[in-house]
Image (tube, grey):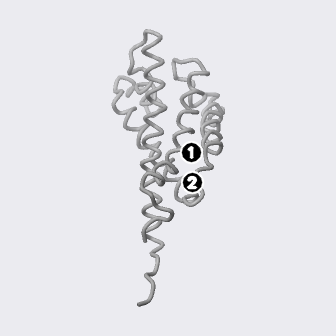
């Protein structure tokens, strides 16, 4: 019997699925911090998701569930964007620092001036350090979860 051939499309699909799952969990971690910080400061817990929705259109600021959905979808997309090209490297377990660097990169990119002098993260009614903590939480989960998932499944290589 000849050995089974590896299907590269199946491996790509597995890496994309792991990336989406990782991104969604990372997005939930960062959003959890933002909601918790709002609640600790006596603000309504849905201020952060509502402000995320207002980034798209100002009239959506009263729809926090749209902001929540938008944040989760964007996080899943970013997770897949990271995990697909770096799949084998992410499974090695040496990814906490690159994950933190991704979180800092998101924070820096969010503070770059846009057209008209606006910044992407300016609408957030939270201090900058709190947004940085949320971005770092995103980065930690993004860096650590793929290796933990792979270890929990007990696979050295994706099935294929």
On the image, the x and y values in percent for residue 65 come to 33, 30
Residue on which disc 1 sits: 143
Secondary structure at numbered mark 1: helix
Decide: is 40 above or below 35: above
Q: Decide if residue 82 is on the left or right side of residue 32.
A: right
146 vs 110, nearest the viewer? 146
- Residue at image position (49%, 45%) is 145
- Residue at image position (45%, 24%) is 48
- Residue at image position (46%, 61%) is 155
Q: How many labels sit on residues? A: 2
Task: Please identify the residue farthest to the bottom as the structure is shown.
Answer: 1
On the image, the x and y values in percent for residue 30 come to 49, 32
Circle nearer the N terminus (2, 1): 2
Residue on which disc 2 sits: 90
Quick check: marks 2 and 1 in contact, CB under 8 Å? yes
Q: Quadrant of the C terminus?
A: bottom left
Gap in angstroms between the C-alphas marked 2 and 1: 7 Å
């Amino acid at each position: 019997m000849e050995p089974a051939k590896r299907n590269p499309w199946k491996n790509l699909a597995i890496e994309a699925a792991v990336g989406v799952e990782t991104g969604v969990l990372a997005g939930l971690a960062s959003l959890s911090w933002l909601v918790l910080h709002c609640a600790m400061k006596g603000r309504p817990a849905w201020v952060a998701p509502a402000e995320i929705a207002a980034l798209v259109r100002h009239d959506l600021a009263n729809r926090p569930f749209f902001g929540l959905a938008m944040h989760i979808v964007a996080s899943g997309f970013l997770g897949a964007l990271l995990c697909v090209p770096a799949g084998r490297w992410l499974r090695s377990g040496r990814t906490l620092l690159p994950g933190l660097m991704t979180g800092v990169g998101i924070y820096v990119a969010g503070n770059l001036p846009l057209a008209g002098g606006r910044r992407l993260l300016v609408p957030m009614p939270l201090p900058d350090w709190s947004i940085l903590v949320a971005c770092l939480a995103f980065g930690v989960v993004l860096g650590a979860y793929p290796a933990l998932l792979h270890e929990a499944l007990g696979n050295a290589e994706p099935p294929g």
